[in-house]
Amino acid sequence: MDQDILYHLALGNESHDLVEMFGDIKFVCMGGTPRRMEIFAHYIMSEIGYKLPTGTALKDISKFSYRYSMYKVGPVLSISHGMGIPSLSILLHEVIKLMYHAKVKDPIFFRIGTCGGIGIEPGSVVITEEAVNGLLKPFHEVVVLGKVVKRPSLLNKKLIRDLKLLITPEDPYNLIVGKTMCTDDFYEGQGRMDGAFCEFSEIEKIEYMERLQKNDVVNIEMECSAFAALTYHAGIKSAIVCVTFLDRLKHDQLVHPKEVLEEWQQRPQVLVARYIKRYLQKM
Ligand code: R2B
Ligand code: URA
């Protein structure tokens, strides 16, 4: 296309010099909320010792899309993807095209997120080894021209191993590498009884959670299948690192205080920042 408008990012290849703006990107980090990704942008800036040009401040490049937030800190992009597969999928299409227009070679994509754990201590961090859909299959399915298109939701094994090695004895949490289930809903779709509707019993819920556990699912969130499948389809190395906010064998509601959840949310950021820092030091 001569003209490509990346509508949801408020960018375009004719309106912006995308090579000049993004040509040096090495890492794309995504997470659900604009606030978390702004905090990550500031954090990664101090971690990699990046200095903004004098007289400038970190700014939300996609502010005028009113959809997603995007911050650039040297070779790192920090972008919010919203909740669920549709929101993430729109963003990934446009960010993959952005990388292409900017002539970026071999970027690494991370999702740094939150999730519900199954039988693990809240505050634990999970690196997704395998992303499965609600039917426990390692695929992302999307209807294209009235037909189901099935794509494998695969993640980079070496990246998973390298991330796992970055935990230190001082880190106050468990790091688990395991299977993550992706759902299209936070309430009924994740077997919660506290939504506006619930048409199953507590026994059925517990049986379901135990079935997930028997199938080695350690956490549940709402984007992993699409994130893994679309990055894999594009030939982009990617990994998913999420902190668990609760143990779904015990609770449906998020009972921990906001300050505790905020502190936990930093854990995936710290691990991914360590990876980025080491990678850049080796360059
Ligand atoms: C984790 O948290 C969100 C729901 O609260 C969703 O985006 C996800 O995957
Ligand atoms: N995000 C989810 O998708 N589920 C949870 O239980 C917590 C965070």
Image: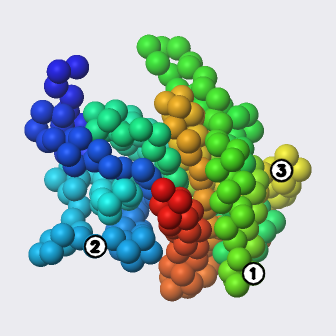
Residue 191 seen in this snapshot? no
Q: Which residue is at 56% across, 68% downward?
A: 274
Other-residue count near label 3 (Cα within 10 Å), few / some / many at <14 / 14–19 / ≥20: some
Q: Earlier in the sequence, mark 2 or mark 1?
A: 2
Q: Which residue is mark 3?
A: 216
Disc 1 marks a residue whose amino acid type is: Pro
SS state under label 1: loop
Q: Position of residue 36 (x, y in %)?
A: 41, 68
Viewer-proximal residue among 26 and 267: 26
Identify the image quadrant of residue 2. top left
Q: Which residue is mark 1?
A: 169
Which of discs 1 and 3 lies nearer the camera? The answer is 1
In the picture, the disc for residue 51 is 2
Rounded to the nearest angstrom, the CA distance separating label 2 from label 1 is: 31 Å
Left-right relation of 3 to 24 = left
Q: Position of residue 180 (x, y in %)?
A: 69, 50
